[in-house]
Image (cartoon, grey):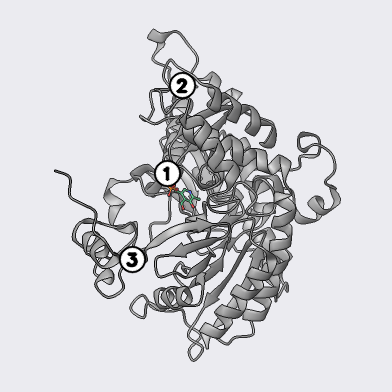
Amino acid sequence: MPTPLPHDWTDRLALDRAHVWHPFTQMKVHEVDPPVPVIGGEGCDLLLADGSRVLDGISSWWTCLHGHCHPRLMGALERQAGKLDHVLFAGFTHEPALELVARLRPKLPPNLTRAFFSDNGSTAVEVALKMAFQAQLQRGEAGRTRFGALREGYHGDTLGAVGVGELDNFMTGLFRPLLLACDRLELPEDPRRELDADLAGWPERLEAAREAVRAYFDEHGDRLAAFIAEPLLQAAGGMRMWPPELLQELRAQCDAHGVYLIADEVMTGFGRTGTFLACDQGGSISEREASGSEAPLHDRWRGVAPDLLCLSKGLTGGTLPLSMTWATEELYGHFWGEPASGRAFLHGHSYTANPLACAVACASLALFDDEPVLANAAEIATAMADAFRELSAHPAVRQARVFGTVGACRLVDPATGSPDTLEARYGWKLHRRALEHGLLVRPVGDCLYLMPPLCTPPARIREAGETLRALLG
Ligand SMILES: Cc1ncc(COP(=O)(O)O)c(C=O)c1O
């Protein structure tokens, strides 16, 4: 006999407490603050079991793009559910996967021609790392056994992805003995994104950073299979916004040293930074402003083209798990051969290219074509700047900055100017209090940020800024 479902949330929360292990959570916390029951999603809001409605200010971990339960996405899911739920993707193919490739390809850097499917951001990264390593081996570069990555990066929680993330933090440092060999490069944040920027000495600092990139590649370049970066915005590292000039420099140095460049756009993809990809903004800021925006993307494209591109999160508009790793024809060519050659990429997951997820992803991409999604993102950017400018007047707020639809600042103790300590758990307390005021925020470390769905009305963002201002006291 199956156990009957408990009748109210007291019983359900007891069930949660007895048997569930939540992600990224010290479970003891839930003895005091149980997980928040959510019963629905509507547009940019989540509906909580206590009858309240909260703005999903972090797009449910950066996934939700067009709003929760968007009718076109739900309709696509329903239609696909009536046709084909799932089929293995080795030796088989299906319409939703092919439609997705056809829809996405024209929106990507023109050199990316080959799509490999998997299930989430971490696996998209694992695939890219393994592809880069194997491609180097098969092009005769067996000595390239290491990876390059940025300090403060985050690429997921599987061991390969952890190995190229930041290690000097409590989440990942303890896995050090199990990880890939990785050489890290530190880049400065871009003060031009700050609302109250001090640009004194910036050109010199930028040039020094460029020089540091060159020096890093001179030292490590001939041993690296690939260099991985979150283009222009390191999200989990604390919304670190870094200069497009340095993305160009990374590209140039990867080319000069035979290293594959992996762009991890798991978070930055699908309009979050104001363009479809953050890589599209790889030209320097002034070059971009001069480039105009009317011509088709592939004609006016001024971005930095990676060799491998990882996409997930917004790929299905935030509805179902799915990811893709896109590769160049050059890289793909190193895997080509007779079956006995042993050159194939022998990697895959049970739910690779799940048709339901692919169908929803197609519907999400269609919205980019049919509705002014990127224009909405631009309006969000303006509202975000207003909200964070307002917030920056508070003595606990430092370094307010905006990049596309992402607004962020550092929270400090106003008395000492130093960041919140882990013990004070200020971010967690702010998160819980904000929920009572209709807003879901969840600071990462000392970084308070907003990254709402792209359908969020600008007025709701200004309102969220006022709520935060009031909560900071
Ligand atoms: C840049 C980046 N890469 C990879 C990941 C991992 O994605 P997932 O949590 O879907 O495995 C994340 C998750 O936040 C991310 O921000």
> Quick one: 196 or 7, which is closer to the camera?
7
Residues at marks 2 and 1 touching, judged by CB atoms closer than 8 Å:
no
Q: Which residue is mark 1?
A: 122
Q: Quadrant of residue 11?
A: bottom left
Query: Where is residue 169 shown, x and y percent of the image?
Result: 37, 63
In the image, 48: left or right of 381? left
Which residue, given by chain and number where applicable, does mark 3 sit on?
35
Identify the disc placed on residue 138.
2
Q: Viewer-nearest of labels 1 and 3?
A: 3
Between 110 and 78, the one nearer to me in the picture: 78
Q: Quadrant of the N terminus?
A: top left
Q: Is residue 130 left or right of residue 252?
A: left
- Asked whether disc 1 touches disc 3, contact meaning CB atoms under 8 Å apart, the reply is no
**Dot 2: few (<14), some (14–19), or many (≥20) neighbours within 10 Å?**
some
Residue 327 visible from this viewpoint = yes
Residue 71 in the image: state x and y as whole percent: 58, 45
Q: Quadrant of residue 464?
A: bottom right
